[in-house]
Image (cartoon, helix red, strand yellow):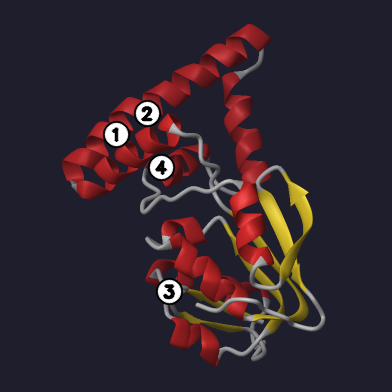
Amino acid sequence: MHSFDYDEDSVACTQELRRRYFDGDDQWIVEQGSALDVDYLSSLGTFDIVYAWGVLHHTGDMWLALQNAQLVVADGGCLFTFVYRDQGWKSKAWRVVKRTYCSSAAGRVAMTGIFVPYYVLRGLLQDVVRLRNPRRRYAEYRRRRGMSQYYDWIDWIGGYPYEVANPPELIAFFRSRGLELEHQKRYELVFRRSASGASETTA
């Protein structure tokens, strides 16, 4: 198995997980690398399973990242991916929010001060209507996701760069590169490269 990320903290986190649960496993490589670096991707070889879920739309050049990701899918192999859906004006508005959050300390304070209270109050209202203990919401979320809801909010508000696409665009994009849609659950897509490895276009 080969894991890589451009962000040093993400690499360090994965290395710590390997140390805790797969200590001594020299077949799991964890390193820093970029999905936008075609030379780096080409150096890895090919894999039966390529998993890029919810990350390539944060690279700053999503279509190049998608192009590079499919290069390492072996003949008969699968690519698992998820890209934010294009919601028109809503996506444009969120891009402004995310860019503002990442622009400066003042931007972070402003966007956090607006959206975190909004999420808290929205959840509280839902709990009141349903006669639920508000604390239960956060405890259940942590058990289900393995992280606090607060940090998930911050992850969403500050997730920039931020690009979007719709499933038909992605299906056409990968089909032209020899991968067919095998499974779809809303915006989570699994593509499989034909065993012949035929690819009609290149980068």
Q: Amino acid at mark 1?
A: Met
Q: Amino acid at mark 2?
A: Phe
Within-10-Å neighbours for mark 2: few <14, some 14–19, many 20+: some
Instruction: Give the residue at x 43% y 76%.
Output: 34
**On screen, 105 above or below 117?**
below
Find residue 161 and report its image quarter. Answer: bottom left
Q: Nearer the viewer, residue 103 or 155?
A: 103
Q: Amino acid at mark 3?
A: Leu
Q: Amino acid at mark 4?
A: Ile
x and y, in percent, of residue 101 in the image: 28, 42
Q: Which residue is mark 1?
A: 111
**On screen, 99 above or below 190?**
above
Quarter of the image for the N terminus: give it. Answer: bottom right
x and y, in percent, of residue 172 in the image: 64, 58
Q: Are marks 4 and 3 in contact (CB under 8 Å)?
A: no
Q: Which residue is mark 4?
A: 154
Disc 2 to disc 3, C-alpha distance: 31 Å
Q: Are marks 2 and 1 in contact (CB under 8 Å)?
A: yes
Q: Which residue is mark 3?
A: 36
Between disc 2 and disc 3, the foreground one is 3
Q: Which mark is residue 17?
A: none
Disc 2 to disc 4, C-alpha distance: 9 Å
x and y, in percent, of residue 53 in the image: 60, 59
Q: Nearer the viewer, residue 72 or 194?
A: 194
Q: Which residue is mark 2?
A: 115
